[in-house]
Every structure is written in structure tokens, then in C-alpha cells.
Amino acid sequence: MAKYFSFLLAVLFLGTGCGSSTTSESSFVLVDAIIYTSDDSFPVAEAMAVVEGKVAMVGHEDDVLKAYPDLRLVSAGGKAVVPGFTDSHAHFMGLGQEKLRVDLRGTQNLDEVIGRLKTFAEGLPDSTWIIGRGWNQVLWPGRQFPTRQDLDAAFPNQPVWLSRVDGHAGWANTAAMELAGMDAIRTASDPEGGAILRDADGEPTGVFIDTAQRYVSQVTPGLTEADLDRALELALQESAEMGLTGIHDAGIGTATIERYKRFIDEDRFTVRMYAMVGGLGDAFDTYCNNPLIDYGDRLTVRSVKLVLDGALGSRGAALIDDYSDHPGNKGLIRTSVEDFNQTVQKALNCGYQVNTHAIGDRANRVLLDGYEMAGATAEGRHRDEHTQVIELGEIERFKKLGIIASMQPTHATSDLNMAEDRLGSHRIKGAYAWRTLKDAGIPLAFGSDFPVEKSNPLEGFFASVTRQTKDLLPEGGWYPEERLTREETLKAFSLDGAYAAFEEATLGSLSPGKHADFVVLSDDIMTIPTPQILSTKVVATFFGGKAIFGTLD
């Protein structure tokens, strides 16, 4: 009780102070609620005072009403309230662009792929490219990579280019390859960090892995400025619907940053964006020792995204030993180790937080070596994006360097039907190892990697606490010892994400003085049976105290 009263006294005079009055749209007392704050000093509250878009007080309803008697009342209808979800690894423009192209996620066979492509192509002239994303051969009978001939039968003349669900492989038909230069592709060697898949006769099959995708992607038509504005609008809309108020955009350039700034200036940007510049280039040079901090309370640029390897599903993840299901193949390092080490050093010299895509155990070892050689310290909060397969013996190195494991729970449940085939029974122990890492003191930050996975954070929440697919398989969970609790998972999607972006003082929990970014849910995800988490909906999303999706009475 003494702890509660000391907390209450500390917050009563925040915001406009006790007894102040305001009619602002972003000032009110939220009542009739079960508020999970992600703040250990007051983890569950009944009411919350919001003043000018900031949390002024959380606590027992009678106490909050007494402290703020003149604020209007907003009822949550007895529903659960959580901090706005943060996705700590996503591709924001990709989410919107996906809606302008063919979505192939979840297709169960080639016929379903062709069906979606035909529907999309209806009425289009033969010269129009059909571009899509989301195929995953692991879900299909036989689990084999597709070929250009699979597309040619339905589209003999119209160019088709389809990205795999993880973005680390592309699939073209012959018409697309002809436009890209079939003769050159036939005679080309595999580029560093990539591969052109070939049949027994040495003919390219139409599937290009990682950096080899550029053979076709460089000739595909780009989107117009109007298309890109529309894509951003669609991404913002979906984020609000999903309860996402924080996004860590993993690898963007100057043009996208300027687009975000324009939308902020026009008051059209309804997420807190932590943007990572995509490797070396104009954006890297622009923000070198010149970070953009909290532009309009909505955009920060102070980190760089690097890429070491590909993905496990396309066997592009870099492994120390051979793939268990493909002897002789160790995956791909997409850049030379020397170049990676030099880039890390340059990034640290520029004051960047360094966030590196590393999926395979070899890539994770290269990451650790590079960070150590460059003199990275825990104060830099440098990150390992995905941390998907690691050698357990190297966890102490993660801890010593203070590396944040930026992970995506639905990657585990999407990959469980092939991951052990790729890795074998020994290496799988160091894969998707959330509990092992957390118990070792490694900070976690959860996201989805959308549009690789769905943007709905509740799917990630469910995966984290169950280690099951949406079909509730396997029974009891896949390596269930790696599950997290609901409380840990909520923090990984909120406060821990804010910490990974140096923003824990203003975001990530419903604590006095922080932005009033919160979500009202149809069900209490902290107490309901786990299968019901997947049917839970976002009732309303509040951003800076204003509803950007849904309404409350």
C-alpha cells in the first residue's frame, strides 16, 4: 500500500495537474477498463487520465477521478487496454505496396498461385508486368522450388515476377527473363551472396536467390509517386487497424524518409517511426553523426540496417555446417566478411546503432566478430535482426556486447514444418530460442517482419505464448520450453521495443509523462484461453490520446 501511495503522489501533478480542466479532444479519463500498463510500478490499473495526449495518471478509478474531476469520461466498456503495439522489425512501405500487387501468402499449391495471378491479370494488356509476393514452396505438395515453366503455361507472353514470402528469392516466367536478357542469365555466374537455380541441363529454372534477384528486378517497372503515397496511406490504415502505434522500419532510403516527413508535416502520419537507413548510401551519409530525433514526435533516424545472409526457407541462411537436407550447401553470406567489418566500423564512427540481419549460425558468428572488432559496447544497444539460429555457446558474447535480439515469433511457427529438416536435431536447439536468450539476460524486441508475415501483432503474441500454429499444432507447442509468458510477450511488443529504439522514456508503457498510445481489445489477452487470442480484435487504437481507429462511447 505504501508503494502505491508514493506512486500516486508522484503522478498527481503531471500533465495539467490535479483538478485542472480542459475540453481538448486528447484529454479525458478512461474508465471501466482493465489496463495492462507494461509498467512494473503499477502493472494493472482501472483508469487512466490523459491530458493533451500524454498519460497523466494511472491507478484505481476512484483515485484518478478524484485527481481529475473536470476531464470528460470515456468508457472502455470493461475491456482490456494495452500499450500501443510496437513492431520492432518491419518493412512499412512494403506493407502498402503489397496491397497494390498480388498477395500469394498462404497459397497451398501451384494451381492456387495461378488462380490468384489470373484474377489479378483480368483486363490487363499483355505488356503489363504481373508482380506479386508471398509464395512459399514449403507449403506445397513436394515442397520443391517452382520453375518458369509452371508460369509459362498460363502466361506465355505476359512477364511475371513473384517474390518469395521472405523476400529472399524471386520466381520469374520466361517472358520476364527474356526482357531481363535470357542469354546473359544463361551464361552468368552466381553473384556474390546469390544463386541462379538451374536444372540438370544447366538451364536457369526461373528462381533467383538473394542478390541474384537483381537480374530480373532491375527491369521490373517501378511505382509512381502517386502509387507510393497510396501505399503509405494503406500501410498507415492497416497499422491503425492492427493496434500498431510504433514501427521500426528495417532499411529505407532518403526518398522514403522524406515521404514520411511530408506526411508528418501534413499531420497524416499516425505511427511513431524508428527508421533504419538501409546500408551505405545517401541516407547513411546524410545522417552520419547528424541523427534525426523525434521529428514531429513521430520519426527518428539514428540506426543503420545491414544484411549478412538470406533466409532459411530458401536455404540462403548462412550456416557453419551443411544444411541437413542439402549436403554441400552452407547458404550464402551476402557480402564479404571484410566489407561487413568495414561497414560496421564506419557505422560506429558515424554514431549509428547497428542493426544487422543475421539468420544462420554462421551469419550470427560473423555479426559477433564484426561488432567486437569495431569496439561495439552495450551503451550502443546494437541489434541482431532475427537472431534466428545461433550456437548456444556464443550467448555470452551476445551478453557481453549488450546486443538486443530483435526477433519475430511468427517466424518460428511459419518455419516449424521445415526448420528441423534444414538444421537437424542439434542445431535446432539454438533456433528461435526466445526463452533461452531472455533467461541469459539478452534483451528481446518483438516484431513481425511484415509483409513477410502478417502485420497483426496478436498473431505474434499467440505464437510467443504457445509455440503453435493457428491450427494449434503441434499439441503442447513446438519446443515449448522456449515459450514466453503473456507479461513478457506484452513487454516484448511494447516497452522492450521502445528500449531497442532508445525511446523507453516516452513510449512503450502507459506511464505518466509518456505518449497516450494505447489499444482497446475485444478480449483480455492476458487471461483468456490461448486459442481465443487469435480471435481477439482491436476495438480502438489511440495515438497521442486521439482515436485513429474505432471508437469508444
Image (spheres, rainbow, N blue to C red):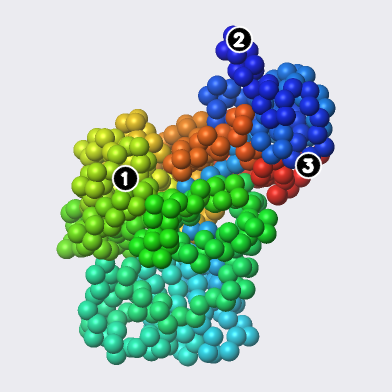
Question: Mark 3 or mark 1: which comes first in sequence?
Answer: 3
Amino acid of disc 1:
Ala
Question: Mark 2 or mark 3: which comes first in sequence?
Answer: 2
Amino acid of disc 3:
Glu
Q: Residue 428, how many percent across, how many down?
A: 28, 45
- The residue at which mark 2 appears reads as 1
Q: Is residue 501 above or below residue 214?
A: above
Q: Residues within 10 Å of mark 2 (few under 14, many from 20)?
A: few
Single out the residue that lies furthest toward the front: 290
Q: Give whichever of 275, 419 is nearer the camera.
A: 275
Q: Residue at position x 78%, y 42% from top?
A: 25
Q: CA distance from mark 2 to mark 1?
A: 43 Å
Label 2–label 3 contact, CB within 8 A: no
Tell me the element at label 3: loop
Q: Residue 422, how many percent across, how many down?
A: 28, 55
Q: Residue 348, how many percent across, how many down?
A: 31, 49
- The quarter holding residue 444 reads top left
Q: Residue at position x 51%, y 30% from top?
A: 487
Q: Is residue 112 left or right of residue 65?
A: left
Q: Residue 168, how many percent across, how many down?
A: 37, 65
Q: Residue at position x 35%, y 44% from top?
A: 382
Question: Mark 2 or mark 1: which comes first in sequence?
Answer: 2
- The residue at which mark 3 appears reads as 25
- The residue at which mark 1 appears reads as 431
